[in-house]
């Protein structure tokens, strides 16, 4: 590194930074800085967002069942409303991912949750399926922006030693929000004729809390440095990390490479771009298709009248997400991903071939599917931000999310139609085939990113 580069990357000591954050032995990379209270704060803000997003998506299954008794819905509107937030995520992740790489992470960090908060509360007043569908698209639009920028900003602040744990924990918190929504839906969706309105609008409460707490969040120093705003980058790191903290050069140096979606398809990144889009799509199609219409699936395996089974499956979602964090730490990324695709694929094949009389076998197969799917869903928060350089990290994450949500929206729209016209067993076979494709793609193209710095994650 040249003398000029060193001067732009090395920071001074902030008066209020503890001595442990600024070791006297010499410069330390932002990738290797010790975990501190600021990391916890940024993680908390992104985790709160994912709780809200899981909650908002989790309310729709039980709300639709109650809404259908007050405002009858055919299969078309059931599918449209169930997939509407996913369609919004598709557009939001593309638009806000692109804007985040140009305008900065912090602005989108706030704007995305302003949209979610307003649209979530507005669901209380809907008078038609079309109105609810539109509001769910807006909620999804804000979520898409938050997914793209939240993963990018936490990755850019996190030390690599803890990056997998922090990014993987998105799935745990998302799952907890989803399960809380399911529990509320089971108990209160039928409490009164308008209970479904309160259930949907309740997502606005955590959204508002997250929005308020995010005010004052600093800009990503990696993004600032990449845009040539070196003094501002130094000020952020000085305030939150202390002396001798450096921003590595290399691929994150401003002016070296152009950003934008076209950059993702250049020779050095195209394989990682295709992999992240493909594995993400193959993972979330079965996840959202099955769990958006969980009451329908439970009815198909004769568990719709057994509340204990519903609680058990929700418990498996949370347990699986927690196990997933441990496996993210212990296993190579590739091994975890490929093995999980294999297990979930076999679980759905079992569901597709077991006769309806084999109720216990179907329950076990679905429980294994739930546990494993929840565990390796952690990797959707880990792989994309680790695979792309700073100048296109939000675009790369946004594109992967957009592709996944387009696929999951199609899958969610088609699931009730598939069960109605093809039957439960044939529909499970189709979803198993999707997981098999994901496994093959991962075997061929998945990189191992566990020990890379964010500069090394540029595809070099």
Image (cartoon, rainbow, N blue to C red):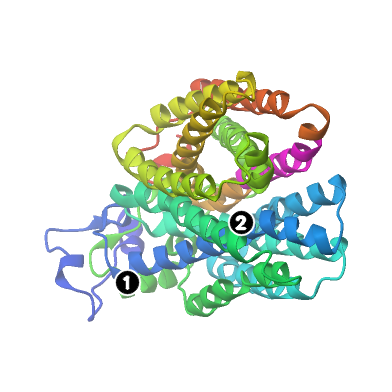
Which mark is drawn over residue 58?
2
Q: Quadrant of residue 27?
A: bottom left
**Circle 2 Cα neighbour tier, 10 Å, few/some/many (<14 / 14–19 / ≥20):** many
Q: Give the range drawn in magenta.
A: 399-417
- Residue 125 spot, x, y in % from top left: 79, 75
- Residue at horizontal 81 percent and vertical 34 percent from the top: 420
Q: Is residue 307 magenta?
A: no
Where does the image place residue 176, in percent across and percent down from the top left? 47, 57
Crowd around label 1: few <14 · some 14–19 · many ≥20 (10 Å): some
Q: Quick one: which residue is furthest to the left in this view?
A: 25
- At horizontal 57% and vertical 48% (from top left) the residue drawn is 397
Instruction: Give me the disc on residue 240.
Output: 1
Left or right, 354 with reference to 22: right
- Badge 1 marks a residue whose secondary structure is helix
For residue 280, side relative to residue 13 (left or right): right
Q: Give the mark count.
A: 2
Mark 2 to mark 1: distance in Å? 35 Å
Would you place residue 33 above or below residue 290 in this image? Answer: below
């Amino acid at each position: 590194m040249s003398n000029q580069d060193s001067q732009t990357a090395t920071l001074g000591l902030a008066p209020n930074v503890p001595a442990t954050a600024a070791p006297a032995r010499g410069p330390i990379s932002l990738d290797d800085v010790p975990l501190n209270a600021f990391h916890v704060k940024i993680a908390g803000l992104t985790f709160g967002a994912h709780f809200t997003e899981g909650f908002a998506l989790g309310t729709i299954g039980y709300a639709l069942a109650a809404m259908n008794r007050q405002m009858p819905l055919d299969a078309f509107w059931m599918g449209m409303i169930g997939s509407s937030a996913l369609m919004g995520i598709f557009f939001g992740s593309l638009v806000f991912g692109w804007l985040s790489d140009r305008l900065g992470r912090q602005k989108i960090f706030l704007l995305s949750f302003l949209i979610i908060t307003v649209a979530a509360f507005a669901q209380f007043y809907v008078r038609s399926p079309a109105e609810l569908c539109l509001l769910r698209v807006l909620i999804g639009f804000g979520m898409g922006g938050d997914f793209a920028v939240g993963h990018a900003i936490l990755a850019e602040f996190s030390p690599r030693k803890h990056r997998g744990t922090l990014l993987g924990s998105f799935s745990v918190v998302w799952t907890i929000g989803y399960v809380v929504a399911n529990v509320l839906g089971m108990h209160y969706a039928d409490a009164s004729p308008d209970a479904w309105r309160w259930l949907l609008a309740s997502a606005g409460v955590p959204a508002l809390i997250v929005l308020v707490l995010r005010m004052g969040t600093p800009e990503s120093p990696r993004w600032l440095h990449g845009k040539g705003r070196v003094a501002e980058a130094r000020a952020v790191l000085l305030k939150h990390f202390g002396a001798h903290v450096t921003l590595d050069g290399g691929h994150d140096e401003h002016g070296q490479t152009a950003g934008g979606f076209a950059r993702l398809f250049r020779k050095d990144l195209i394989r990682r771009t295709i992999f992240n889009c493909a594995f993400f799509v193959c993972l979330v199609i079965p996840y959202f298709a099955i769990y958006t219409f969980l009451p329908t699936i439970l009815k198909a395996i004769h568990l719709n009248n057994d509340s204990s089974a519903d609680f058990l499956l929700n418990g498996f979602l949370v347990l699986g997400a927690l196990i997933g964090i441990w496996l993210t730490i212990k296993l190579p990324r590739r091994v975890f991903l490929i093995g999980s695709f294999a297990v979930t694929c076999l679980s759905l094949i079992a569901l597709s071939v077991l006769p309806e009389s084999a109720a216990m076998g179907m329950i076990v197969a679905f429980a294994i599917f739930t546990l494993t799917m929840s565990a390796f869903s952690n990797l959707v928060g880990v792989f994309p931000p680790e695979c792309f350089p700073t100048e296109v990290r939000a675009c790369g994450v946004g594109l992967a999310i957009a592709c996944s949500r387009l696929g999951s929206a199609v899958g969610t729209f088609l699931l009730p139609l598939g069960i109605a016209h093809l039957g439960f067993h044939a529909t499970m076979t189709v979803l198993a085939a999707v997981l098999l494709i994901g496994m093959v793609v991962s075997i061929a193209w998945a990189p191992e990113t566990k020990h890379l710095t964010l500069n090394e994650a540029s595809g070099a």
